[in-house]
Image (cartoon, coloured by chain):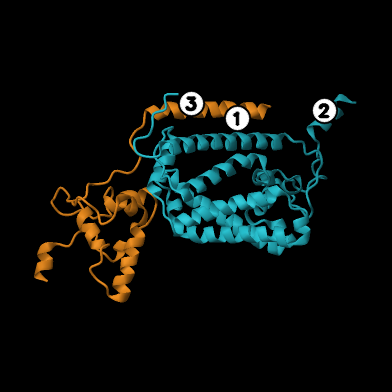
Amino acid sequence: MGLRSIPGEHGNVNTVFAILYAVATVVLVAGLGFKIAQYARTPAPLKIPTTPAPLTPAGAAFRVAREVVVFESLFKANKALWIFAALFHFGLFVVLARHVRYFQEPVNVVIQLVQPFGLYAGLAMMAGLGLLLLRRIVVPRIAYITGPSDILMLLLLLGIGASGLAMKGAVHTDIVAVKAFFLGLMAFEIRALPAEPPLLVHLALVAVLMIVFPFSKLLHVPGVFFSPTRNQCDNPREKRHLAPWAAKLEAGGN
Amino acid sequence: MNRLRLAVIGFVVLATAILAGHGAMAGDGRPALPQAKGSVCVEDTQVMRRNHMDLLKHQRNDTLRQGVRGGKHSLAECVSCHATDGADGKPVPVTAEGQFCQSCHSFAAVSIDCFSCHATVPADPARTAIR
């Protein structure tokens, strides 16, 4: 294959992680693309918005936005779970935004401004994950319906957070080299990665997360946008809801 | 089946591109830094890259809270060794674009607190002597 070893140390580690991230990226993007296309093609034959529902499409879009951003129906249903979920998801959002700095040069102003909040967001994320895990173990009704994947996803995210916070607070890594590695990867070049356990564990777990994402419960991320009870508006009398297959039957006079 | 085929094709394309690009490596991708004046740093380069902030903060606490002076990890020493002279012969601040501190800090989007109090250029020997 004409693989040259890297000037410096640990050439194999660099190559393994470069290929791992190439595979993970392809699986994540292609897998998500496939699932989104599948969700978009899935028929929604009935008009079933949960009432009271918005009367206009714009209103329905706003309702979906509230669902996505502040988890409205969860708030109405279960306050404790809402707090756990909000801690985790908002924390993760800030942490992800903060990590954008590893993939762009120069770094966007908004990404620069979010940097100081990373540690607190990381701690909030870990607290949320810990509480979500505790809930799955401690609450009998929840423990009864908990499958292996529920626990494994939480452990995977906890592992990512723990290794990340370890690098933030205790055993720093050479973040300039990490950024050089990922900028290199985006230009199809393999550069040196600091071969240190916390970083390699962190990166390996993230790659695993990217790979399992399109096959897991984490598909609620695109899936929430396709919920018929949330994304439909309440106008069945003003405008008749006719699924394409039903329209065909009607036109064919079957 | 479709999904599998897509994944396999994508993987082969990307892996090939990476392995092909591998031959054409262009440097290590780190931001360029001006050469330091001294030959050896107070710590190993790998240690400094990872832990300079902790070393500086530790010495700050020693100096500020316990009055211990003359420590090994002195910010003033960092600046005097790593600041470069501009075309006009005057030292360029280490926080200026492309200078020692700023290059990596801007690359990694990390703000520097040090220089809201401390000087970004080495102390002027003439002025220090008068004082």
Q: What x and y, as percent, mark residue A48?
A: 80, 46
- Chain B's colour? orange
- Which mark is nearer the camera, 2 or 1? 1
Instruction: Classify residue B29 as left or right of residue A15.
Output: left
Q: What x and y, as percent, mark residue A68?
A: 65, 51
Compared to A214, does A245 lie above or below?
above
Residues marked 2 and 1 touching at CB (< 8 Å)? no
Q: Secondary structure at mark 1?
A: helix
Label 2 to label 1: alpha-carbon separation:
35 Å
Rendered image quadrant of residue A37 = top right
- Which residue does the numbered mark 1 point to in the structure image? B7
Label 2 to label 3: alpha-carbon separation:
47 Å
In the image, A120 versus B27, the foreground residue is B27
- In the figure, the cyan chain has which letter? A
Q: Is residue A75 visible?
A: no
Compared to A213, does B63 lie above or below?
below
Q: Secondary structure at mark 3?
A: helix
- Which residue does the numbered mark 3 point to in the structure image? B16
| Residue type for callout 1 | Ala
Q: Chain of mark 1?
A: B
Mark 1 crowd level (few <14, some 14–19, many ≥20, 10 Å Cα): some
In the image, A39 versus A203, the foreground residue is A203
| Residue type for callout 2 | Lys
- Which residue does the numbered mark 2 point to in the structure image? A248
Q: Secondary structure at mark 2?
A: helix
Residue visible at 81% across and 44% down? A236
